[in-house]
Amino acid sequence: MQIKKKKGLDKNKVSRNVFIFAMIIVPVLHFLVFYLYVNFNSIIMGFQYPIKGEEVLSLRNFKWFFSEFGETALDPSKANSNNIVYAVINTLKTFGINLIMFPIGFLTAYFIYKKVPGWWLYRVLFFLPMIIPAFVFTYAYQTMLMNGSPIVKFLTEFNQWGYEPSILSEVEHANNAVLFFVVWQTIPGNLLLWSGSLSRVPDSVVESAKLDGVNWVQEAVHIIIPVIWPTFAMQFLFLFIGMFGSSGPVLLLTSGECGTQTLSNWLYQQILMAGGNEKSVAFNRVSAVGLLMTAVTLPICLGIRAIQGKFFKDVEY
Amino acid sequence: MGVYKGKSMSVSQKITWTVVSILFGIVAASYTFVLIWGFVSGTKTGTEFGTMKNPFELPKEWHFENYIRAFSAFQFDSVNLLGMTFNSLWYSVGGALICTTCQMGLAYVTAKYKFRGSGLIYMVCMITMIMPIYGSTGAMYRLVYGLGLNDSFGMLLTSATGIGTGFLMFYAFFQNLSWTYAEAALIDGANHFTIFWRIMFPQCIGLFGSLVLMQWLAGWNDYQGPIMYLNEMPTIAVGLYRFKEYMGGQGDMSLYVAASMLSCIPALILFTAFSNTLLKNMSLGGLKE
């Protein structure tokens, strides 16, 4: 009897272990190959430089990056997709816009949650930038900004340019047009996550605040944000984690030409252009620039995380 | 929940609500306009596109047959729109199912079972999520091409990740899920697989479905990954990108627009049908280390 019980226990333990193994084996292997190996290899590649088909240890990729920041780096005649200085500056500009759009995205979700007139319609329409492929939006935008378009005519008169420019093909205008596109597309923010979190705010909390006579600003700042703090803090942290990934659909709008390049698109295009030539120095440069970006972002993210943990506590409800 | 009630509002609140309504209306109208413009422009002829001076002009003749013609005439490397749709489907549906299943499985065992390494797995998931890693595109490219995963169904292997926002959502969900039914089932002799599929999975089906839909949408609209790795098995996104790149905007752009608009339809239908389910299930907890 005792032996049977022991066997039964062992069988259960084996079944439990087999189950755990089956559930974790694929993601763990994926992590080892596509995350750990890839990133480790990427770090090594950053410190390698191809000479006559051989990759030798070198700091030349990093030196190249800093040497690019010369006096003529922002020369409009060199504002092509390879110009990394434009890429750095435009990335920071886009990140700045994302920072501004972060509270706007929250407010959009908040007003829909408060059921402004037509909220049910906005709740669907504001998802269109997420649902409709970027190809559709970018092509429509390009067509609206073509020569002869009433929008360009209006802009020409309004700004007194004196001629009708090809807005997305001229260095003076292209990046502003891309940034405007980013603003236009990110007004709803991450509506799905905000809405999901707001829908979990207990009605009783909001109702009692209302009885106390709070206005909408006080309600948003003192009631809603503390209650949905975990989502708020996470979204804010993710914003900084993706700091150097900030970019509009530059590949589709301008291919990074005319002073519109961003870092994430630069990284992508370098590999795309290097294509089949895997010995190209582009692979090593991309890894080196990526390492520098990580080195700058990591302490910022850890700092924000530490501040969030120290000064703000999650609310239980 | 406090809702808009015109009579009980102060003047300043009424002004705020009016301004917000106007701004929302303008933004929503601009998005809707793109959709309508696309569907209308898809009925123009290629010549009309070539000689177009005003993008707001209506078609001289409405060629609705463009939407039928696009299925066969819109081609890239002898793959037509039907073939591209098939490639988009396996890439997006397969990727979404694999990714969400992996995240669910990993979150479930990490939240509900204590085993050697469970703490480590959770910690790794948290760290990788807040780790800003850039520049691995080159290393990834070499690996994918080295393993021969490009231009094949093998690309789905790259989706089998357990890490991501989905992991966090599942983890929070399973942590709050009672273990009582599982205990009862264990006493009745059920194994752990049965408990998971018969008892736990049905309870998280809403979250699972929502995440699959979100992942599918991301895969369906993804162009960067397929452009780099699926040139011989082009998805709709690759086809559209290459068509425009090679034609330089000089080809039959009515076909381009018609194909683009056709690619919106599945996403529009699915999203409209499941928007309430999505909104109910999507919320993100904090990171607890």
Image: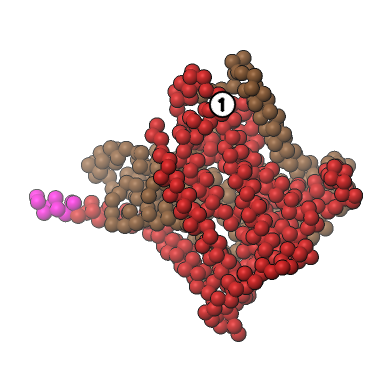
Q: Is residue B196 left or right of residue B83?
A: left
Q: Which residues are magenta?
A: A1-9
Q: Position of residue B151 (x, y in %)?
A: 59, 65
Under tag 1, what secondary structure? helix
Q: Check disc 1 and report the residue beneath it.
A: A216
Q: Residue at x 50, y 41 (%)?
A: A232
For the residue carrying disc 1, how many other residues have a C-alpha within 10 Å: few (<14), some (14-19), or many (20+)? Answer: some
Q: Residue at x 58, y 76 (%)?
A: A60
> Image height check: is A260 above or below B17?
below
- Name the subunit of mark 1: A
Residue at the bottom extreme of this rendering: A52
Q: Colour of chain A?
A: red
Q: Residue at x 80, y 52 (%)?
A: A167
Query: What's the magenta bit mostly, secondary-structure-wise?
Result: helix
Is residue A286 visible in this depiction of the protein?
A: yes
Q: Colour of chain B?
A: brown
